[in-house]
Amino acid sequence: MTTIAVIGRGNVGGTLGRAWSAAGHDVRFGGRDDASAAAGEAEVVVFAVPGSAMEALLASVGPALGGKVVIDATNDMQGSPPSSVHRIAAIAPDARVFRAFNSVGWENMADPVFGGVQADLLYCGADNATATDTVEQLVADVGFRPVRVGGLDEVATVDGLLQLWFALAVRGGRGRRLAFKILTD
């Protein structure tokens, strides 16, 4: 069992938190006003707030991130880049930072199986085996097959999936129930 602070109670945060609670994890929710308290007691901190809110939020919660696994699931669709991983790493240099849960809609987090096929969740992050195992378990506990793309040098690649998802699901009119599957021989 892992103690997880989910910062954000909306569609993404609520969906992830419910899945992890159902899998037996101790989930604590935090928001703008109580994020530091939730993060302070957790082993894993997941940011699931609008990306535009991250700069102000990190100013207050940053000191509580030291030594923790931190997952950035935010998307600042007006920002460049859309992720906050570099801001997180700068404010908490000893945190093990990952980029995950940002390239599929929250509806797919609630049900990541399509016609009997389990969707993949592509992610990247810290080069730390223990932290990677933790993130892969959390991805699997939501119901996805975890696929590591690489270290934090692959953030732009993972964020490219976000752009592809929006192009297909929203602008392309295929609908939000759309996810990815990596196929190999």
Image: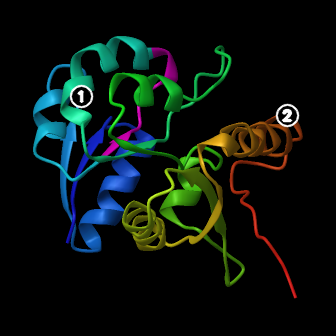
Residue 143, x across and y down, in percent: 50, 73
Residue 44, x across and y down, in percent: 28, 51
Q: Give the label, 1 or 2, closer to the camera.
A: 1
Residue 52, x across and y down, in percent: 50, 15
Marker disc for residue 119: none
Q: Mark 2 = which residue?
A: 171
Quadrant into which the N terminus falls: bottom left
Quadrant into which the C terminus falls: bottom right
Which residues are the magenta region? 45-52
Q: Within the magenta stretch, is there residue 48?
A: yes
Q: Is residue 163 left or right of residue 13?
A: right
Determine whether 144 is above or below 117 in the image: above
Nearest the viewer among 80 and 115 is 80
Residue 16 lies in quadrant: bottom left
Q: Within the magenta stretch, is there residue 126?
A: no
Residue 115 lies in quadrant: bottom right
